[in-house]
Amino acid sequence: MVTPDAQESDIAGRAEAVVEVQDLVAHYGRHKVLDGVNLSVEAGEIHIIMGGSGSGKSTLLRHLLGLRRVSSGRIRLLGQELEGIHRQALQELRKQIGVSFQGGALLSSMTVGENVTLPLREHTRLDESTMAIMARMKLEVVNLGGFEHFMPSQLSGGMTKRAALARAIVMDPKLLFFDEPSAGLDPVVSAELDELILRLREAMHMSIVVVTHELESAFRIADRITVLDSGRILISDTVEKVKSSPNPRVQDLLNRRPRVEELDADAYLARLTGE
Amino acid sequence: MGFGHRTEGGYAVVELRGDVDLARSPEARALILQFLEQRSDLLVDLSEVAYIDSSGVASLVEGYQVAKKEGLKFGLIGVSEAALSVLRLARLDQVFPIHSDLDARIADDG
Amino acid sequence: MAEARLMWVEQLGRRTLGLVAEAGYLSALLAESLYWLFVGSFQRQPVRVSAVFSEMMRAGVNAIPIVFLLSFSIGIMLAIQGIHTLRTFGAESQVVIGIALSITREFGPLITGIVVAGRTGSALAARIGTMVVSEEIDALRVMGIQPVRYLVSPVLLAMLVMLPALTVMADFAGLLGGAVYSALDLGISYGAYADRVISVLKTGDVLQGLTKSCVFATIVTLVGVANGFSVSGGAEGVGRATTRSVVLAISGIVIADMVFTWFLNR
């Protein structure tokens, strides 16, 4: 029972990418961490950004969240340019975007329920009872029903991530960022989280960007995978294409082979002697 | 597009239309609670709803709870597939009495 | 030699630039906190009243015992020193003037400021620093909640209320300490002491102390918060920021006090 209206907006949504990155360059001090990154995430897509530590994937995420200023390049979220955006417009944009941080980042001074309710309390004028029901509904969705009065410090790692996810989706965002959903979790719990991500996309038609270094999780849920290495994108394509990529670095990463650099004897000697 | 209501088959039927989102769900909630306060059995018609978010669903949940407490009948009719998927996410499809339309509900009431 | 001097100059330049940058940052922080206090509620982004009260409790009410104790001790100490000094001139009964003026103009606000810097300044740096490390600040930001409005403005308001209030209490405690010792040593009755204090003190003296306490409140809050926000490098970084904020806040208070006293008494 899809109304014509909904169909139209669906098509318009597909035409416009929810995340667009063009020629992004970023530095930490003098060190270049991102070097000409191009990325596009389509509406309704689950897009995985993968890479080892030091690949620049965390930096890329911080840029996508508008937490860092770019050295050069452009980022558009839900059709909005981030650079030079007015504070109020950024605020409005952020109401439509949910973020689940790696460590959960729940405010430790508040209960789980208060944490989940926080965005509603800050951004809406809903009735207290509506907000409470919404928060409990989202806690139910992430299988944390009955935990609203717990403090974040009382939760296990997996529970913290799920609570953070509940907070991230409490405003029904169009776009969800999920940083390392499976890091530090046992395989069963992380498989549950993967399942949850798929259900969210299906029920709420969210576009979901997941940053991870876990291969199994990535292959299980991704529509497309972007592989970052040393600040550059190696490949950004469907799971099948990534798996069959001829690029040796991609294959190294997929098969967990450590990077072997060719040894430059002179440079190596200079490094060792500190000259 | 404002929300409407009608009385039919012994039920007050609240007709939600368009988007039931953060901006408009308070209005839906007020309407639902108003009829329940008048102690009338209530159905919420979702057939004209293009999009319902969790604040809209929360209003339905609250209405159902109030109705139960007051011993009034409550139900949803004309639930679209999109709305159903939102309900399903929180397993609320197993909670609400859901019927395709008013006649089905009345038939079910016996 | 020349090279060494050049490096020294360069370092001095760097330090100065750093100092200017820090001062600029503190001013921006102050401006933003005040902005949210005054403008926030018009933009549907009010400062949380509950946070203001809990902060008033934490920073103010809980500090009452220690502020009282220290101010009382300072009062006694001033009386001892004053009587000892004035005895040389046979003018020990004039000690009350000295106590009354130095407590209200100087020691009341100073002791309060230092105690609050030690308690609240460090706690602020630690709390915000921990939030930085655990990405809670980032989380607030991406939820569209301004960290300064949410975390700093309530503290600043609470401190601007509580520090003057604590200072008034410190004034009383200090004067009481002086009275107790004067009564013991010189046999001045409490009634006579009180009369003397009231006749000596002008409103301006007390106001001078209260004005200072508002400045101290601002210094402690900004320094604590700024150090918290600048934390990097995990738990160790939080520890460093905490120590740094106490040292800087107390230094700031003493130097600001000197500058203030200089200008107010010319």
Image: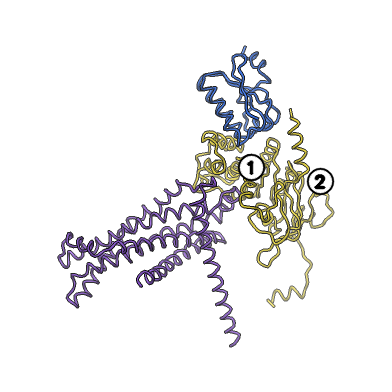
Chain colours: A yellow, B blue, C purple
User: Residue C164 is drawn in which quadrant?
Assistant: bottom left
Amino acid type indicated by mark 2: Glu
Q: Does residue C34 appear to the left or right of A225 in the view shown?
A: left
Q: Residue A202 location in percent, x, y?
A: 71, 36
User: Could you tell me which chain the residue with mark 1 belongs to?
Assistant: A
Residue B65 pos. (x, y %): 54, 26
Q: In this view, does C24 lie to the left or right of C190?
A: right
Disc 1 residue type (three-letter): Val
Task: For residue B84, say whether it is visible.
Answer: no
Label 2 SS: helix
Residue A196: quarter of image: top right
Q: How many marks?
A: 2
Q: Disc 2 versus disc 1: distance between alpha carbons? A: 25 Å
Q: Nearer the viewer, residue C177 or C217?
A: C217
Direction from residue B78 to residue A264 in the image, left or right: right
Give me the residue at 68% from left, 57% from top: A53
The percent position of residue A260, horizontal first and vertical second, equals 77, 63
Q: Quadrant of the C terminus of chain A?
A: bottom right
Within 10 Å of the Cα at label 1, are there few (<14), some (14-19), or many (20+) other Cα atoms? Answer: some
Query: Which quadrant of the view contains residue C159?
Result: bottom left
Residue B31 is situated, as x and y percent measured from the top left of the image, at 57, 26
- The residue lying furthest to the right in this view is A246
Categorize mark 2 by other alpha carbons within 10 Å: few (<14), some (14-19), many (20+): few
Which labelled disc corresponds to residue A189? 1
What subunit carries mark 2? Answer: A
For numbered disc 1, what is the local secondary structure? helix
Which residue position is annotated with label 2? A240
Q: Which residue lies furthest to the top in this view?
A: B110
Mark nearer the N terminus (2 vs 1)? 1
- From this view, report whether residue C238 is shown above or below residue B19: below
Label number found at residue A124: none
Q: Which of marks 2 and 1 is in front?
A: 2
